[in-house]
Image (spheres, grey):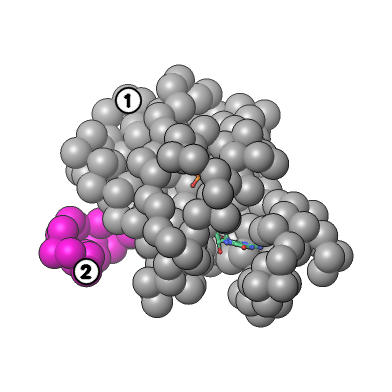
């Protein structure tokens, strides 16, 4: 059974720095993994909408953690998509798909010296457990088959193409560094060919 839109409602959003935008938030039935993923439509999407696949990060998105770049990326995506029109898919893939408690276990291992990927493996997980089948289903349910994708992660564009979504252009997100996330971002560049321009490793 293909996925379908279940409900769409407007949610006015205001970020910590005051940026505000109305999101048309859709829920779905029939998603492959049965999770409660959301699609947020900002602005007026044209034929090729700008899309961000945002993986849930409770510590970064909600609590403002400086260990990663998720909060600023979410804020950046909301503004850029509002400008051009498109969708932010808020995917319930906490911890690159391993879940919140294991992510915090992985943080503890990183504090003991492992990098973000080695920590996953030490816990018995893959470097990245995310599968974007549900994201492709959501886009199809929204009537979208061709996108511009906002990401630095080549796995996201690769999987979307394999899943039958045409990716016209990949647009990099800005680099949001902090003293606490530098090592994390450097590991992404070293291990998964993320297109992030970091100042100098160190
Ligand atoms: N397992 C694990 N997950 C983490 C860690 N730090 C952040 N995450 C998770 O990584 C996901 C965020 O990754 P994304 O923002 O999609 O970043 P990305 O894969 O680098 O892709 P782009 O931002 O699109 O370039 C969220 O689910 C976070 O919870 C970590 O150290 N370990
Ligand atoms: Zn994060």
Tags 2 and 1 touching, CB below 8 Å = no
Q: For the view shown, which residue lies furthest in the front direction?
A: 202
Magenta range is 5-27
- Judging by the rendered image, the residue that carries numbered circle 2 is 16
Left/right of residue 64 with respect to residue 112 in the rendered view = left
Foreground disc of the pair 2, 1: 2
Magenta: main secondary structure equals strand
Determine which of the numbered discs, if any, sits on residue 47 in the image: 1
Where is residue 13 drawn, in percent x and y? 22, 65
Q: Residue at x 13, y 64 (%)?
A: 18
Q: Is residue 18 in the magenta section?
A: yes
Residue 200 picture location, percent across and down? 49, 40
Category of crowding for the residue at label 1, using alpha-carbon neighbours closer than 10 angstroms: few (below 14), some (14–19), many (at least 20) = few
Location of residue 110 (image quadrant): bottom right
Above or below for 34 versus 138: below
Badge 2 element: loop
């Amino acid at each position: 059974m293909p996925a379908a839109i279940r409900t769409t409602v407007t949610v006015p959003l205001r970020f910590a720095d005051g940026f505000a935008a109305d999101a048309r938030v859709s829920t779905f039935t029939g998603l492959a993994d049965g999770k409660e993923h959301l699609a947020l439509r900002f602005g007026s999407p044209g034929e090729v909408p700008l899309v961000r696949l945002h993986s849930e990060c409770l510590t970064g998105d909600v609590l403002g953690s400086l260990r990663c770049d998720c909060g600023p990326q979410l804020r950046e995506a909301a503004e850029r998509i509002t400008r051009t029109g498109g969708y932010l898919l808020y995917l319930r893939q906490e911890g690159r798909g391993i879940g919140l408690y294991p992510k915090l276990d992985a943080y503890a291992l990183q504090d003991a010296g492992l990098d973000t990927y080695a920590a996953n493996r030490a816990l018995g997980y893959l470097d990245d457990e995310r599968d974007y089948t549900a994201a492709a289903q959501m886009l199809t349910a929204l009537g979208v088959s061709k996108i511009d994708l906002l990401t630095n992660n080549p796995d996201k564009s690769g999987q979307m193409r394999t899943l039958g979504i045409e990716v016209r252009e990949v647009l990099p997100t800005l680099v949001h560094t902090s003293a606490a996330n530098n090592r994390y971002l450097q590991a992404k560049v070293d291990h998964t060919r993320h297109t992030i321009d970091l100042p100098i490793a160190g």
